[in-house]
Image (tube, rainbow, N blue to C red):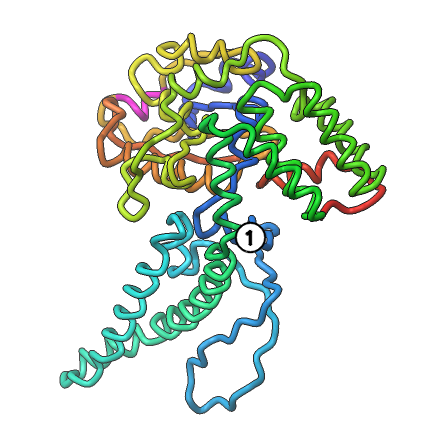
Amino acid sequence: KRMKQEMDPESLKGLTPQIQQLYVMDRDVDLVTPFITQLTYEGLIDELWGINTGIFDPPFIIKKEDSSAKKPATAPKKQKIGLNSNDTVFAEIRDQNFSSVGAKLNAKALFIEGAYEERHGLKEITEIRDFMRRLPELQTEKENLAVHIEIAQQIKKRTSDSAFRHHIGIEQNIYYGEDEKGCMEYIEELIDRQEPLSKVLRLMALFCAVQGGMKDKQLQFFRREIMQTYGFEAMLLLDNLERAGILRRQEGKNSFPSVKKGLRLMVQDIDETNPSDVAYVYSGYAPITVRLVEAAMRPGGWRAIDTILQALPGPLTEHLLPESPAVGAGGGTRVIMLLFLGGVTYAEISAIRFLNEQLRAAGVDSRTGRLHFIICTTHIINGSTLLESLYEKVGAIQ
């Protein structure tokens, strides 16, 4: 819009926009999702150890498969792993709920083994030549498979622990609005055990986002307990969280229940292996941001959910530009940019990829039948890194 105002209109004639629609969403619109534990393969890597600009620096040693038997055995050493879709094994499992990753890796191992076994039946020169062309790719896949099997085993150790499962259960109780007393007792227990402060504050922030705040008496109690346990530095963070509206006292009407119902955020009996809904990324919870993208793709767009949008923070602003001739009836792929201000989680990205495939398969865009989402953001975040951004530079949050 600004470009159209500042540039000579004649110079813009004949230019075809490469992006047909832009949706901008501030993180304030959905402060529930970041504080819930991500349950996709890529999301769990980020939750447990962190991913820095697509690089994973594991705190454990990964022994790679040697692609050549002639190479001498070397002692395994720590190494950084690039996590991107150039790694075909990672591309297949990055968006999967972790409960289905084991089966995917097993299927990949059988596929690679079968591809190697084909060499015994080769007789024709052309067949041998084709196999030799495929061999480097198979060797790379075998090496990458070994890496992701090791990472998956490490994740399994953490997620199979009863304490981890109990923590996920508490999160679910909070966003379902169940057993408030038990949730408060669990947060107090975490403080008493001197668990990482981020673990405590994520649950408090999640509770405030879902319940419209925390009772003043309860909030003051937690403030005192946190100060006594974690020191005065933690109070600076608590003050910042309150100024940002992440921690707050209950005041006025809580809008989350109407948003939860209107956008169908909770999905019962989700199939995590063969999902049909974006809620699989959190095992039954659909991110508000992704439901908004989903709604925008339906007839009527966001205007059809105006009542729900009014319950969310911030105004809705819409700018309409002339339709691009390149995406008229049967004209091509409609490219939609999604811009997240304040960060987006890996699980939300996985959900949007899944939604993109669903919409393509269903031909939702009646004008083209083809959609392509481009995701842009200021940061890739999880609940802990979001808290770190508000931490005073007097210490490091665990």
Foreground pick, 374 / 216: 216
Q: Which residue is drawn at 58% across and 34% down?
A: 343
User: In the picture, residue 101 is in which quadrant?
Assistant: bottom left
Q: Which residue is painted at 60% across and 32% down in the image? A: 184
Which is more toward the observer, 279 or 167?
167
Where 183 falls versus 385 (above or below)?
Answer: above
- Which image quadrant is residue 279 in? top left
Residue 25 locus on image (x, y percent): 52, 24
- Whether residue 298 appears in magenta in the rendering, the answer is no
Q: Determine crowd level at label 1: few under 14, some 14-19, many 20+ residues with C-alpha closer than 10 A.
A: few
Is 325 magenta? The answer is: yes
Amino acid type, mark 1: Gly
| Viewer can see residue 16 | no
Q: Main secondary structure of the magenta part?
A: helix
Quickly name the residue at label 1.
54
Which residue is located at x 48 percent, y 12 percent? 319
For residue 208, above or below residue 387: above
Write the start and end of the magenta stretch as one range.
324-328
Residue 289, compared with residue 278, is above or below; it is above
Q: Which residue is drawn at 47% across and 25% down?
A: 177
Q: Where is residue 394 in the image (x, y as percent from the top left)?
A: 85, 42
Mark 1 secondary-structure assignment: loop
72 left or right of 276? Answer: right
Residue 202 in the image: state x and y as whole percent: 62, 36
- In front of the other: 190 or 3: 190
